[in-house]
Image (cartoon, rainbow, N blue to C red):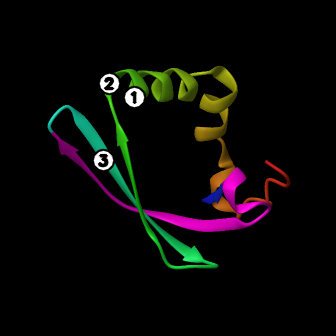
Amino acid sequence: MFFRSTGLGKTELTVKASSIARQGDWLVLHLETLEPVKWKLRVAMSLPDLWSIIKALLRWSNVKLMFSTKWKTAPEHPGDF
């Protein structure tokens, strides 16, 4: 996956998710950047955050992507996102 931050200008980070764990009332997603730097990032998500993500994933266009055959090939770069 790719990350971009307004604080880093046009720098694009290549990231992989390494784990997810519950910590009290939070889910903590652990991420590792691979390029251009090696960082460990953590994202703490509360229940309202999770519901927002679930609702976004359940939009018809996203459901179609999840069940498509496009997963068999490497995706094209998303461009300027």
Q: Are marks 1 and 2 in contact (CB under 8 Å)?
A: yes
The percent coordinates of residue 11 (x first, y second) are 74, 66
* Cα–Cα gap, marks 1 and 3: 11 Å
Amino acid under label 2?
Answer: Leu
Amino acid type at circle 3 is: Val
Between 6 and 15, which is closer to the camera in this rendering?
Answer: 6
Stretch in magenta: 5-23
Q: How many angstroms separate mark 3 from mark 2 (CA)?
A: 12 Å
Q: Which mark is residue 64?
A: none
* In the foreground, 76 or 30: 30
Residue that carries the numbered disc 1 in the rendered image? 50
> 39 above or below 54?
below
Residue at 17% across, 43% down = 23
Tally the marks: 3
Q: Is residue 46 part of the magenta span, yes or no?
A: no
Q: What number is the disc on residue 47?
A: 2
Dot 2: element: helix
- Of label 1 and label 3, which has the lower sequence position? 3
- For disc 3, the marked residue is 28
Q: Is residue 8 magenta?
A: yes
Image quadrant assignment for residue 35:
bottom right
Please, is residue 81 above or below residue 59 in the view?
below
Residue 62 in sight: yes
From the viewer's perspective, is 19 left or right of 76? left
